[in-house]
Image (spheres, rainbow, N blue to C red):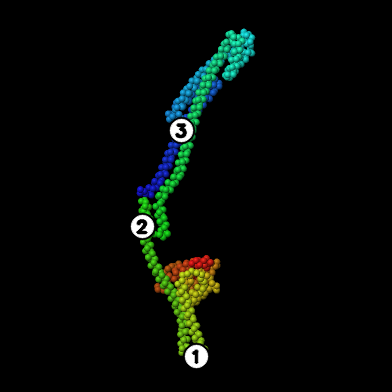
Amino acid sequence: MKLKIWHKMIVGISIPSLIAVLGAILTYGYVNDVKEKQSFVQFADDMKENVLEIRRNEKNFLHYRNIDQIETIKNAITSFLDLTGKVSLETANQVGIEEINPLKESIQRYSELVNELGKNFQKEIKITGRVRKEGEKLENIVLSNKLAKEISTSFVLRLRLLETNYMLLHNDKSQLELSKTLSQISNVTPFCYDCSPYINSIHDLITVYRHSDNLAKSLQDNGDSIEEVTKTISDREREQISAYISMTQRRLLIGLFLLCILGPLFVYKTASYIAAPIKRLAEIARKIADGDINLRAPLKEHDETFSLAVSFNTMLDNLQQTQQSLNESLELVKEKQAQLVESEKRASMGFLVSGIAHELNNPLNNISLRAEIVSEEIKAFPNERIKNYVKDIVNQSKRAHKIINNLLDFARTRKSSDMEKQDIVRITEDSLNLVTNQFAINNIKIIKHLPDIPFNVYGNRSKLEQILVSIINNAFQAMAGTGTLTVTVEPTDESKFIHIRIGDTGKGIPEANIKNVFEPFFTTKTPGDGTGLGLAISKTLVKEHKGEIHVESTVGEGTTFHITLPAFEETDRQEEINT
């Protein structure tokens, strides 16, 4: 598929966005499900609360046997029935319709029991009133002594107390005590017609109380069953929503974990896919910057980088052609530069040879003159005088030989390129010796401030001599036949560098030209008198020796060249050994 970069970017942005939207939709769905399940829990809790309210009213009803409580219980039952009657089919199915329908029936039965118990309580009230009334009659009969002596007032009062106890406690013990006491009346007076109404009312009271107890027990059992069912439903719904929330949390955590892992991975893969062609171009550009211009960008992706790669390759083709042309031009420039350098060397050599030729002429003229005198007057002079002439000839020959040897030494050292420990004081002295006679012929005075001890630098002798001779030659030409050349060699204050000053009293250099004196082919001489490479070559050679060179000049007063070279150190010796 031919995708453009912006297509890739849209895909890279769209897919994470779709994942985020999908996650949001799922989260929204989970939240809605939780809210829906929460409504189920709320319904179950409402049922449970209504039942608890019914049971609280039931306790009050049973404890106080207050008929008015029936209305309160019925209101609570009505609320429960309204709640279960209005519930939606979905909620009923979720909570458990198989439990809600029986629950409604149980509530109906519970309501019937309440009504029946209420009626029985009303009967209790009537019978209780009758028991009290008959009890009072019995007391009056006893007080009037109409009954047997065995039925005393204390006996009746005790019987009434047991009656009251039974009415209050409604338990088997109080009922048993009351029944035993009543049986005593029958034993004493079997045919006590005045006692029969009271005894019958007590029997009716026991019967109605027992029936009330049975109804109350049935009511409580029914209420317990209803309460248990609603509690079970409520607990089950809470457990279900708690389990669902836990499951949702686990799913969300798993989704978040996968999103944190797969999201950055997908972004990384997408970014890598987008950046791959650009990285290839960058890598090729780096290798080309390192010098390998034969590489070409691969034409793989058909996106915006395709045309970029094509243009890049075209640029490389042009660059390679340009480099070939530049290499050819550079070779030509090097060839011409070598010719110019050689021309500069010849100019310096011509300057030296002219001085040396003049220097040689003097001893050779003396030799020739003495030889002629010796040949013509050998007979006319005593032997001692001849010896002096011959001695003079020998001395002049040695002088000429020394000059020639100096010239040969100068020529030999120019062929060497080795860097080694050099005495710059000796090199300066030798360079001045090469031009001393030439300066003397032109009435130029040389003032030397050279130390008596050697100062060593790390360099090449021939190149150092070339630097000094070139600057001295420029000074000679600047003074035009008269003046003073001052040469000074001294260490700097830190003794880490050697400072060489070469000053002349020539015409000086205009300020506008000072910045150009070290530029190649710059010269103020007339055409044919110089190439303009001498000082440029000197500066290059000084840089090769890790030194510095600069010039100071005042028009009409003269020019001074300052050369600073690093003093020789043991690290230079180690470098010399390694070389």
Q: Please name whichever residue, 343 or 112, is drawn nearer the observer in this view of the structure.
A: 112
The residue at the point 62 percent across, 8 percent down is 146
**Which element is circle 1 on?**
loop
**Which element is circle 3 on?**
helix
Is residue 103 at all visible to an observer of this figure? yes
- Residue 519, located in which quarter of the rendered image? bottom left
In the image, residue 46 above or below residue 117: below
The CA distance from mark 1 to mark 2 is: 94 Å
**Which element is circle 2 on?**
helix
The image shows residue 115 at horizontal and vertical percentages of 50, 19
Check contact, mark 1 vs mark 2: CB within 8 A: no
Q: What kind of residue is marked 2?
A: Thr
Query: Which numbered marker is on residue 381?
Result: 1
Compare marks 3 and 1 and give the one earlier in the sequence: 3
Check contact, mark 3 vs mark 2: CB within 8 A: no
Please count the marks in the image. 3
Residue hosting label 2: 314
Compare marks 3 and 2 and give the one earlier in the sequence: 3
Near mark 1 (Cα within 10 A), the count class, few <14, some 14-19 or many ≥20, is few
Residue hosting label 3: 37
Q: What kind of residue is marked 3?
A: Lys
Q: In screen coordinates, is 89 left or right of 188?
A: left
Near mark 2 (Cα within 10 A), the count class, few <14, some 14-19 or many ≥20, is few
Is residue 484 at all visible to an observer of this figure? no
The CA distance from mark 3 to mark 2 is: 69 Å
Q: In screen coordinates, is 262 left or right of 210?
A: left
